[in-house]
Image: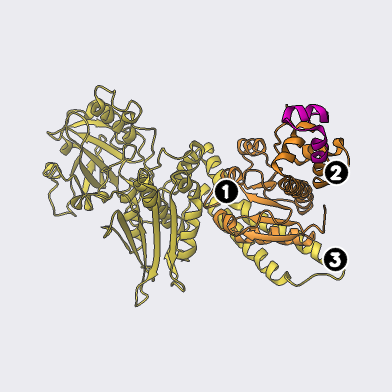
């Protein structure tokens, strides 16, 4: 599943939303773009056919997905395909509509399971998605190795629909990366998105630069005194060095995001990763009237992985938690982040707990299903992506009910990465 | 009235430890006594805002309060200099309207910081002196009897003793005695001095303002 989306909530201040959205886009592998609020939100209850509107908005969302996507009706005929599908498969949209999906995608000899387009709609109450290795036929007669993911069914529109996403396996410029691939994530950035991100990160850089300037000037002033006051100077200089490294790290991150690079596999201090993300989301936290407190065990073992991607996972979990407690009473607008190592120190466990209303017992697993969301403005892909990233790091991401109220999302990451 | 004034204080409130330390060092290098806090609630609980002239250097984005919210709660007790990482003009305007002494953008030049702090502390000294003065005048007023207070309220409006006596239904001679006691207790030698004392204290006195 090379598609994904992080949810940006509309309760945030507009400049923050746009900055954050721009930032998240940078960080989202083959990010499914959020192009606007689903219309249902704007007219609240006044729309005569909100389901039809949402179906329409599904198409506009799929249109901007940097992946090949088709919609099927209940007889498995193509009813719509996005621009990328017409590009990859070589057919015009009207050449595809009404044609059975089997004309475009057949099972790969590599995958013994039969492709069952009907299977995914078996249990309507619990939407599911399935992925097969497959061969995609293009109009020019070429057969492309692909991975086909079907998600059924978005509970919108007059009739249930199936979304088919075709990911080409290799060699194509329009390819999207296979799950687990940390490198080579395709990248599209407009100048304005870069500007937004630069503003958000620039704000972060101001802090260490302020400290460096003030410390250096204070040192000058202490030394100019007679006799020179040098009592505090070594501590002062240690802070200058630390802040210069801090500024450097932010700028490096900005440069990497601007180039669309991922950071690759580097050592990661989980504690500072968590603190960074909490600080980054401070304004969102404040806007929600919530508090986020972190309990981070001392002496955690270092992880190895892609710090930008893991940051993205944490941003997503925290924004979800803020969303969850948004309408709660003040005493429940509390989010806890706990980080500890397992006893044998082979894994680091992160837990993000909210005191929100939670979900019904059997909905817990569905949280991770693509396109399943409880949020009017969400696309239901944040957790899917987060889990993909965590799994690419050899770890696990799952949710549990809290004993009292709310949910806890657990991440377990191995201390020694696969590489 | 101005016995040895206590040493002025600069409070620094910023959640970034290194920024806070650095700002404190600059201020100490300028000879100021500094107290620093990492969050608004610690400041609200721990800082003594009234026993000495004090000003506050306040980071606009705190983890627990917005700077503007804290400014509203402090209600002008201490002059506030805002320090902001992003030069948000709207916030600056809002803060200045609400009475901020100054608004600095990070990074802050040491010379500017010291100059602005000196300005804020000068204002703090005036506020502090005014508070002391008001407390002193209040003490003197409290030492008056109810009758003396009535007499004072009338004479500061310019009423002659005879009219005061008529109004209060007392003998003019008695009013004269009350009047002398008021002047003595308020530690003034003339009516003009008494009026000036009361106006300068900023206290709300019945009869002082029409």
Residue A341 vs residue A81: left or right?
A: right
Quadrant containing the C terminus of chain A in the rendered view: bottom left
Q: How is the image coloured?
A: by chain
Q: Are marks 2 and 3 on the same chain?
A: no
The numbered dot on residue B188 is: 2
Tell me which segment is drawn in magenta. B156-179
Which numbered disc, 2 or 1, marks the residue closer to the eye?
2
| Residue A170 seen in the current view | no
Q: Which chain is orange?
A: B
Neighbor class of circle 1 (other Cα within 10 Å; few <14, some 14-19, many 20+) is many
Chain A's shade in the image?
A: yellow
The numbered dot on residue A122 is: none
Spatial separation of the CA atoms under disc 2 and disc 1: 49 Å
Spatial separation of the CA atoms under disc 3 and disc 1: 34 Å
Residue A123 in the image: state x and y as whole percent. 12, 44
Residue A27 in the image: state x and y as whole percent. 44, 49
Residue A87 vs residue B104: left or right?
A: left
Residue B46 in the image: state x and y as whole percent. 60, 60
């Amino acid at each position: 599943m090379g598609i994904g989306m992080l949810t940006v909530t509309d309760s945030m201040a507009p400049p923050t939303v746009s900055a954050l959205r721009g930032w998240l886009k940078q960080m989202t592998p083959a990010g499914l773009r959020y192009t606007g609020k689903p219309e249902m939100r704007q007219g609240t209850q006044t729309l005569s056919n909100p389901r039809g509107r949402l179906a329409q908005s599904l198409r506009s969302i799929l249109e901007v997905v940097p992946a090949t996507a088709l919609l099927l009706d209940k007889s498995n005929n193509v009813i719509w395909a996005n621009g990328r599908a017409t590009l990859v498969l070589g057919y015009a949209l009207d050449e595809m509509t009404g044609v059975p999906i089997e004309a475009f995608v057949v099972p790969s000899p590599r995958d013994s399971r039969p492709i069952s387009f009907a299977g995914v709609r078996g249990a309507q109450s619990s939407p599911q998605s399935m992925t097969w290795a497959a061969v995609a036929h293009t109009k020019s007669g070429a057969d492309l190795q692909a991975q086909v993911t079907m998600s059924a069914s978005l509970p919108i529109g007059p009739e249930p629909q199936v979304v088919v996403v075709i990911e080409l396996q290799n060699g194509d410029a329009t390819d999207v990366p296979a799950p687990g691939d940390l490198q080579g994530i395709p990248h599209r950035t407009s100048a304005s998105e870069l500007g937004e991100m630069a503003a958000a990160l620039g704000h972060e850089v101001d802090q260490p630069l302020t400290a460096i300037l003030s410390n250096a000037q204070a040192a000058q002033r202490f030394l100019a005194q007679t006799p020179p006051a040098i009592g505090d100077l070594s501590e002062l200089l240690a802070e200058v060095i630390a802040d210069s490294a801090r500024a450097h790290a932010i700028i490096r991150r900005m440069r990497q995001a601007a180039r669309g690079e991922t950071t690759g596999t580097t050592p990661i201090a989980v504690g500072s990763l968590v603190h960074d993300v909490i600080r980054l989301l401070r304004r969102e936290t404040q806007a929600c009237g919530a508090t986020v407190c972190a309990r981070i065990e001392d002496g955690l073992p270092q992880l190895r992985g892609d710090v930008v991607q893991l940051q993205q996972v944490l941003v997503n979990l925290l924004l979800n938690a803020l969303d969850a407690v948004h309408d709660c009473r003040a005493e429940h607008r509390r989010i806890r982040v706990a980080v500890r190592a397992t006893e044998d120190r082979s894994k680091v466990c992160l837990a993000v707990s909210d005191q929100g209303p939670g979900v019904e017992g059997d909905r817990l697993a569905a949280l991770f299903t693509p396109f399943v969301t409880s949020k009017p403005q969400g696309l239901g892909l944040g957790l899917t992506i987060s889990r993909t990233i965590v799994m690419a790091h050899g770890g696990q991401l799952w949710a549990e009910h809290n004993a009292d109220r709310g949910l806890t999302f657990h991440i377990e990451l191995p201390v020694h990465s696969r590489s | 009235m101005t016995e040895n004034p206590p040493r002025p204080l600069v409070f620094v409130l910023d959640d970034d430890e290194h920024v806070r330390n650095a700002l404190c060092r600059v201020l100490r290098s300028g000879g100021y006594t500094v107290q620093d806090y990492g969050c608004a609630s610690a400041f609200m609980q721990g800082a003594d805002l009234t026993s000495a002239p004090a000003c506050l250097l306040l980071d606009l984005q705190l983890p627990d309060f917005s700077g503007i919210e804290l400014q509203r709660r402090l209600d002008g007790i201490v002059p506030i200099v805002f320090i902001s990482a992003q030069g948000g003009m709207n916030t600056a305007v809002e803060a200045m309207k609400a009475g901020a002494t100054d608004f600095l953008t990070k990074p802050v030049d040491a010379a500017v910081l010291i100059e602005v702090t000196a300005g804020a502390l000068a204002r703090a000294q005036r506020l502090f002196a005014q508070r002391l003065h008001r407390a002193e005048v209040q003490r003197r007023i409290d030492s008056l009897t109810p009758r003396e207070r009535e007499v004072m309220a009338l004479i500061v409006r310019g009423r002659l003793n005879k009219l005061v006596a008529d109004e209060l239904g007392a003998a003019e001679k008695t009013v004269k005695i009350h009047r002398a006691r008021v002047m003595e207790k308020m530690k003034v030698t003339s009516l003009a001095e008494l009026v000036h004392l009361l106006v300068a204290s900023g206290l709300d006195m019945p009869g002082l303002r029409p």
